[in-house]
Image (cartoon, rainbow, N blue to C red):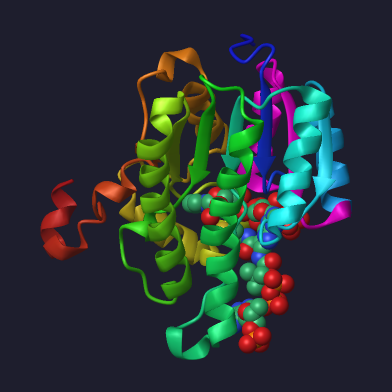
C-alpha cells in the first residue's frame, strides 16, 4: 500500500468501531501515527490493538461532550506523536424514534454528541495542529440535507455539522487549515445501519433506492478520508462530499413511475 500519509499524525474521534475505526486503520496503513478516542475504555483498548497492526497507535477513553477531556487527549497526541496533521471527527449517536417519542434529553443527547462534540473536537484541536497544512474532516450524513421521519435529532445535528464545517473552513483557511466533511451513504457492517435497517427487508428497501443498488464499504469512506488528508486535496476546503453511491442525488427506486419503472 502507498504511504500517502507517511510521517503525519492523525487524531480520530469515535475511532473505536465502524466507519471511523476503518478510517483509523487505513490512516495507519498509509503511514500515519494515529490516536483514537471514544467513551468505552474496553472498546478503545481493543481498537488501538487493531490499528497497531498497521502502525503506531494510542487509544484514549474520552467523551466528545467533555471539552477538557478532548483537549487533554489532543495534547497527549501532540506531545507523544507530534503536531497533528489530520483530525477526523466522527463520534455519533443515533436511535430511531418519532419526535413525540423523544424526550428533550433524548434530542439533546444526539445534538450534544454529534454537533457540539464535533465543535469541541475541531475547536480544541486548533492549537495542536501542524499549521499550515492540516486537514480537518467531520463525518456528516444524508440526513443533514434530506428530512427523514424518526430522525429529527440526527437531521438537526448533522445539518449543523455541515454548516459548522463550512464556517470553520472560512475562518481557518487563511491559517492553512482545511475543513471538509464526508457524507457516507449506507455502509455495510456498521452500527448505524444495524439501527436504521435492522432486517434484510429494510436493507433491500434501502438498496432499491440507491443507484448503485448496494451498501458502501468502510474502505470506500477511508479512501475519501485519505484523499482529503493528502496534498492532492490542497485546494479542497469547505466541501461536503457525498460518498453514497448517488443516494443523495435522489430516490432511484422508480416507485413514482409505477409499472413504467420496469423499463429499467
Ligand atoms: P459506530 O460504530 O457506532 O461508531 C460511533 C463511534 O463513536 C464509536 O467508536 C463510539 O464508541 C463513539 N462514540 C459514541 N458516542 C461518543 C461520545 N459521546 N464520545 C466519544 N466517542 C463516542 O457507528 P458507525 O455506523 O460506524 O458511524 C460512524 C460515523 O459515520 C457516525 O458519525 C455516523 O453518523 C456516520 N454515518 C454512518 C453511516 C452508516 O451507514 N453507518 C451513514 C452515514 C453517516 P464508544 O461507544 O466507545 O463511545
Ligand atoms: N428512543 C427514545 N429515546 C431514547 C432512545 C430510544 N431508542 N434511546 C435513548 N433515548 C433517550 C433516553 O431515554 C435518554 O432520555 P431521558 O433521560 O429523557 O430518558 C436520552 O436518550 C439519553 O440516553 P442515554 O442512554 O443516557 O444516553 P448515552 O449518552 O448513554 O447514549 C445514545 C447515547 C442514546 C445515542 C446511545 O444510543 C449510544 O451510545 N449510541 C452510540 C452508538 C450509535 O448510536 N451508533 C450509530 C452511530 S450513527
Tell me the magenta residue range: 16-41
Q: Is residue 134 above or below residue 168?
A: above
Q: Residue at x 26, y 56 (%)?
A: 253
Give percent across and percent down for residue 190: 62, 52
Q: For residue 98, say whether it is visible.
A: yes
Quadrant containing ligand 2 reads bottom right
Rendered-image quadrant of the N terminus: top right
Q: Residue at x 32, y 67 (%)?
A: 147
Give percent across and percent down for residue 76: 81, 36
Q: Is residue 249 above or below residue 133?
A: below
Name the image quarter holding residue 26.
top right
Towards the viewer: 256 or 259: 256
Residue 115 falls within the magenta-colored stretch:
no
Towards the viewer: 163 or 128: 128
Left or right of residue 9: residue 148: left
Q: Is residue 219 above or below residue 110?
A: above
Give percent across and percent down for residue 202: 47, 65
Q: Residue furthest top?
A: 2
Name the image quarter holding residue 129.
top right
Residue 25 falls within the magenta-colored stretch:
yes
Amino acid at each position: 500500500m502507498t504511504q500517502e500519509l507517511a510521517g503525519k499524525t492523525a487524531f480520530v474521534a469515535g475511532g473505536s468501531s465502524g466507519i471511523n475505526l476503518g478510517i483509523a486503520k487505513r490512516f495507519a496503513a498509509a503511514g500515519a501515527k494515529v490516536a483514537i478516542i471514544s467513551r468505552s475504555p474496553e472498546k478503545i483498548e481493543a481498537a488501538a490493538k487493531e490499528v497497531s497492526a498497521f502502525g503506531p497507535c494510542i487509544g484514549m477513553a474520552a467523551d466528545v461532550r467533555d471539552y477538557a477531556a478532548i483537549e487533554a487527549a489532543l495534547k497527549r497526541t501532540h506531545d507523544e506523536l507530534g503536531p497533528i496533521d489530520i483530525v477526523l471527527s466522527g463520534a455519533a449517536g443515533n436511535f430511531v424514534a418519532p419526535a413525540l417519542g423523544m424526550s428533550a434529553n433524548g434530542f439533546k443527547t444526539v445534538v450534544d454528541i454529534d454537533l457540539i462534540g464535533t465543535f469541541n473536537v475541531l475547536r480544541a484541536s486548533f492549537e495542536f495542529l501542524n499549521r499550515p497544512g492540516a486537514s480537518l474532516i467531520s463525518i456528516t450524513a444524508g440526513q443533514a440535507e434530506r428530512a427523514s421521519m424518526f430522525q429529527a435529532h440526527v437531521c438537526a445535528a448533522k445539518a449543523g455539522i455541515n454548516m459548522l464545517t463550512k464556517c470553520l473552513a472560512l475562518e481557518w483557511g487563511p491559517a492553512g487549515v482545511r475543513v471538509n466533511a464526508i457524507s457516507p451513504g449506507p455502509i455495510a457492517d456498521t452500527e448505524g445501519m444495524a439501527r436504521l435497517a435492522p432486517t434484510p427487508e429494510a436493507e433491500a428497501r434501502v438498496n432499491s433506492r440507491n443507484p448503485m443498488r448496494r451498501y458502501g464499504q468502510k474502505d470506500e469512506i477511508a479512501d475519501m478520508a485519505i484523499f482529503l488528508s493528502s496534498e492532492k486535496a490542497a485546494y479542497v476546503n469547505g466541501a461536503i462530499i457525498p460518498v453514497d453511491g448517488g443516494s443523495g442525488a435522489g430516490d432511484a427506486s422508480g416507485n413514482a413511475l409505477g409499472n413504467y419503472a420496469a423499463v429499467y
